[in-house]
Image: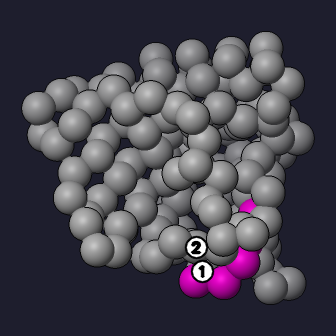
Amino acid sequence: MNEHPAIDDPGQSRAQGTSGVVDLRAEGEELLDQARSTGRGRAVRAVVRQPGQSLVLLGLPAGGGLPEHEAPGPASLLCLSGRVVLSSDGTSHALSAGTACVIPPERHEVTAAVDSVCLLALSLPGS
């Protein structure tokens, strides 16, 4: 599977370029509610898109997350609330609210230990 579950998720973008401001807390709570009500284990929305970069907000209820997938390019994950675990190649990184890490370039997954909201920063090649 080469698709990225956050990029390919049918979420809507709220802001394009630098023309909009997004309330990440309010959007995150909305996404958590959406993920709980759909039972999908996640709700995803691109909140900022510009050439070469995308910021994607993830609402991850406890036990939910992003299944194993390839990194589409350089990326970082910031945990805004809750606690998630980023796992790849036998290594795990626990992220609590206010912490961030570089996403490894190999297959990886993200699992929410508790209800969590994360921001995924993606560098998009060829944009």
Residue that mark 1 sits on: 104
Foreground pick, 84 / 72: 72
User: Residue drawn 33% across and 27% down?
Assistant: 14
Q: Residue furthest left?
A: 19
Disc marking residue 48: none
Q: Is residue 73 visible?
A: yes
Evaluate whether residue 93 shows in this view. Answer: no
Q: The residue tagged with tag 2: helix, strand or loop?
A: loop
Q: Is 77 a magenta residue?
A: no
Residue 49 location, x and y as percent?
29, 46
Callout 1 touching callout 2 (CB < 8 Å) = yes
| Circle 1 or circle 2, nearest the eye | 2
Chief SS of the magenta region:
loop
Image quadrant where one finds the C terminus: bottom left
| Residue in the picture at 60% in, 41% down | 9
In this picture, residue 92 sits left or right of residue 59: right
Q: Tell me the magenta residue range.
A: 105-109
Residue 108 in the magenta stretch? The answer is: yes
The quarter of the image holding the N terminus is bottom right
Residue linked to disc 2:
71
Task: Indicate the position of residue 114 as horizontal and vertical percent values.
Answer: 80, 37
Q: How is the image coloured?
A: one colour
Query: Relative to residue 12, is residue 79 drawn left or right?
Result: right
